[in-house]
């Protein structure tokens, strides 16, 4: 662990809007910035969500949630939005997804003049390159806030990658034992997906499939569908809820990952695990624009243009409520090429450096 910033404090503010999504990204950021040597406090309005991600007992007091991770977790009281806020201002202030700080906290910031960042949502779209690191000035205090956009290009803010990520990956894979005749599938999706059609595709695939379904409503629905079909070559497993620090192991040990949410998608990209992203639906199909932008970034890493078309077509169809069993079969039959493309994109992402390291340098040099 680096200690060059050990005397500096960071406050990360997080409002939980999208189930585990917002909390997941900010908890991972908190852990990564701790490893960069900062003293981190995570202020969150729904700590119950965080308890699952941190892997602690549901009865754990809020103040104890981050103890094992050396992170100070604090409840964002509703009263702070309109009234006083007792928190002292940190050296660095981070808004998660433009969540807006408590007014009383922000009013104290001119006395400290912290470095102030808004960490926004991930996107592979072109426009984020023009917005990344663009400053905005708070009219009340005159303090500059830097808008930071995670992404997968050189001109974006990169993704969160822990300092010891590659070491943990190497150690895990060294001891991994696999059955090469079985396709291992991790499933983590939203319940409004085409779950029954996915189950049919698994059943009709001419391969042994082991499905590990995440503990969520969609996972339970898929397992129920597969059990009802009673297909001999498809085995099912209901996974317990895993702490965030253990999620990468699921990706490393599976051949294909159905993933949802920003943090899970980012981890699949970094791992180089072939994935199908069930992206969170937005008004006016904005999510499809975001999905297709990522596909365009990955396209150059596919040596077979037809395989890329099959992957992108199936992924887009899944996000429109359809799932083609024949396309899925073709992707399985060409899994080695799909895997090669995924690993190539993962190497590209890692070559860009990590969000946490880049943010640390901004703080140090700013």
Image: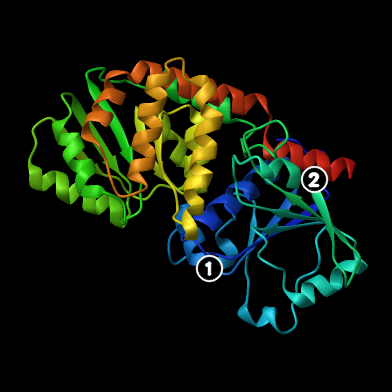
Q: Position of residue 275 (x, y in %)?
A: 40, 34
Residue nearest the observer in this picture, 46 or 199: 199
Distance Cα–Cα, label 1 vs label 2: 28 Å
Picture quadrant where residue 16 is located: bottom right
User: Which quadrant: the N terminus?
Assistant: top right
Q: Regarding mark 2 in the picture, which secondary structure is present there? A: loop
In the rendered structure, which disc, 1 or 2, sits on the residue that comes first in sequence?
2
Residue 187 visible, this angle: yes
Residue in the image at 60% along x and 46% along y: 122
Q: Regarding mark 1 in the picture, which secondary structure is present there? A: loop
Q: Which residue is mark 1?
A: 46
Position of 363 with respect to 282 (left or right) is right
Residue in the image at 25% along x and 20% along y: 179
Q: Which residue is mark 2?
A: 6
Q: Position of residue 192 (x, y in %)?
A: 31, 56
Picture quadrant where residue 172 is located: top left
Position of 143 with respect to 223 (left or right) is right
Q: Position of residue 135 (x, y in %)?
A: 83, 53
Position of 328 with respect to 85 (left or right) is left
Residue in the image at 22% along x and 29% along y: 326
Query: How many numbered circles does the render carry?
Result: 2
């Amino acid at each position: 662990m680096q200690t060059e910033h050990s005397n500096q404090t960071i406050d990360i503010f997080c409002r939980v809007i999208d189930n585990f999504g917002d909390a997941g990204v900010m908890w991972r950021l908190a852990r990564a910035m701790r490893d960069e040597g900062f003293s981190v406090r995570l202020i969150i309005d729904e700590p119950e969500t965080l308890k699952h991600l941190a892997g602690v007992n549901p009865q754990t007091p809020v103040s104890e949630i981050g103890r094992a991770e050396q992170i100070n977790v604090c409840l964002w009281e509703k009263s702070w939005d309109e009234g006083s806020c007792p928190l002292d201002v940190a050296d660095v202030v981070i808004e998660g997804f433009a969540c807006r700080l408590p007014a009383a906290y922000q009013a104290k910031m001119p006395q400290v003049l912290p470095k102030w960042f808004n960490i926004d949502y991930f996107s592979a779209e072109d426009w984020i390159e023009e917005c990344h690191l663009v400053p905005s000035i708070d009219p009340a205090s005159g303090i500059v806030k830097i808008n930071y956009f995670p992404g997968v290009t050189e001109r974006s803010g990169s993704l969160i990658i822990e300092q010891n990520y590659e070491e943990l990956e190497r150690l895990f894979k060294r001891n991994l034992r696999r059955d090469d005749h079985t396709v291992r599938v991790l499933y983590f999706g939203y319940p409004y997906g085409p779950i029954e059609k996915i189950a049919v595709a698994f059943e009709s695939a001419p391969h042994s499939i082991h499905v590990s379904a995440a503990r969520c409503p969609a996972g339970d629905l898929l397992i129920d569908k597969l059990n009802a079909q009673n297909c001999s070559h498809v085995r099912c497993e209901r996974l317990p809820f895993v702490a965030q620090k253990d999620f990468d192991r699921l990706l490393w040990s599976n051949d294909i990952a159905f993933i949802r949410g920003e943090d899970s998608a980012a981890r699949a990209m970094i791992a180089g695990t072939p994935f199908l992203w069930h992206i969170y639906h937005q008004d006016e199909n904005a999510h499809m624009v975001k999905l297709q932008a990522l596909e365009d970034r990955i396209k150059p890493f596919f040596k077979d243009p037809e395989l890329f078309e099959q992957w992108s077509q199936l992924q887009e169809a899944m996000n429109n409520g359809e799932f083609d069993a024949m396309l899925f079969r073709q992707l399985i039959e060409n899994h080695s090429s799909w895997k090669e493309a995924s690993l190539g994109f993962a190497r590209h992402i890692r070559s860009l450096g990590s969000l946490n390291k880049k943010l640390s340098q901004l703080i140090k040099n700013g």
